Image: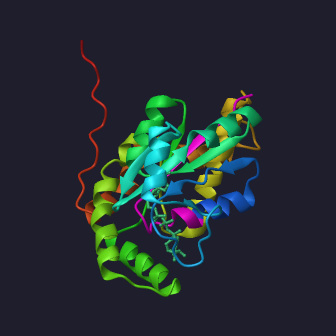
Amino acid sequence: MAGILFIISAPSGSGKSTLVNALRSQVGGIDFSISWTTRQPRGSEESGREYHFTTREQFERMVADDQFLEYAEVFGNYYGTARQSLNEATEAGRDLLLDIDVQGARQVRARVPQAVTIFIMPPNPKVLRTRLRNRSRAEGHVDEDVLFRRLSEASKEIENYSQYGYILVNDVLERAVAQLEAIVVVERTKREGRPVDVHNRRDFEIAESCREINSRERLKPVLDSFGIFPAEPPQRNLF
Ligand code: ADP
Ligand code: 5GP
């Protein structure tokens, strides 16, 4: 049986890596695609673990050789997912998780429409600023320009939230981790054609609560704080 392709996007500093690491430690059977990037390693990052760090020249050669499933320029650096990651997961029938930006997510969705897409939001700009600053401090290097850039990009990325199947607000970490786990359980249950029963009913409720249509009240203050108008509900076709 083919694995599920999960795509997670979030503005930088929202807590995506923290959530993904928690998910991976608690739920087995998901491969994590290690992206290629031209940005410099941060803190204790190692090539081949968080990213494959490379040069612009090599990245552009890989683009020319059509080695990427998707790629995009984010904050002045290239980031890309190697086709090989998806091919290997598909051949092994394993689920694969891509942590990619909104541009990359759009490209993958066009190629793999059945991908499960998840958007993670920070609760508000103040919390996002604090998280970005704390992370930079922990890594021993606070660059105000980088912080400013990442903060100003956040609203633009959040504007795309309604293009995702599930939307999480990473406020209380434990709750966001539980939501992410429930989404994985539910998507696997659906793929295997298993029914909703006493064992998974709670997961279905949690996952459904993360659908855009069921999260409008919860998302409103978050969107307001970033100065974003909520997405219009889909129009009914009257003709
Ligand atoms: P991202 O991968 O989205 O750029 P990180 O996972 O690196 O973000 O998280 C940014 C910072 O915020 C880290 O210092 C992390 O420990 C912290 N963080 C993440 N989630 C939460 C949360 N729910 N509550 C408080 N701090 C958090
Ligand atoms: P960071 O530099 O903070 O690790 O990542 C910056 C942004 O690049 C994040 O939004 C992250 O999701 C995105 N990103 C990481 N890998 C990829 C990738 O392979 N493709 C695309 N399109 N974006 C990526």
| Residue 94 point in image, percent of width and height | 73, 40
Q: Residue at x 53, y 69 (%)?
A: 172
| Above or below 190: residue 30 | below
In the shown orientation, is residue 109 left or right of residue 200?
Answer: left
Q: Residue at x 36, y 82 (%)?
A: 143
* Vertical arrangement, residue 37 with respect to residue 204, above or below: below
In the picture, residue 6 is in which quadrant?
top right
**Quadrant into which the N terminus falls:** top right
Number of labels in the image equals 0
223 inside magenta stretch: no
Q: Which residues are magenta?
A: 1-18
Would residue 225 be found to the left or right of residue 165 on screen? left
Which of 65 and 103 lies nearest the eye of the viewer? Answer: 65
Observer able to see residue 214: no
Residue 149 appears at what percent x and percent y? 29, 69
| Quadrant of residue 228 within the rendered picture | bottom left
Who's the residue at 42% across and 37% down the image?
107
Point 60% across, 77% down: residue: 44
Task: From the viewer's side, name the closer residue of 207 and 35.
Answer: 35
Residue 180 in view here: yes
Residue 17 inside the magenta-drawn segment: yes
Quarter of the image with the C terminus is top left
Residue placed most toward the observer, 174 or 18: 18
Q: How far across and down, in percent of the image, does residue 176 sit? A: 56, 61
In the shown orientation, is residue 70 left or right of residue 159? right
Q: On the picture, is 152 further left or further right than 206? A: left
Image location of residue 112, percent across then percent down: 52, 31
Observer-nearest residue: 62 or 153?
Answer: 62
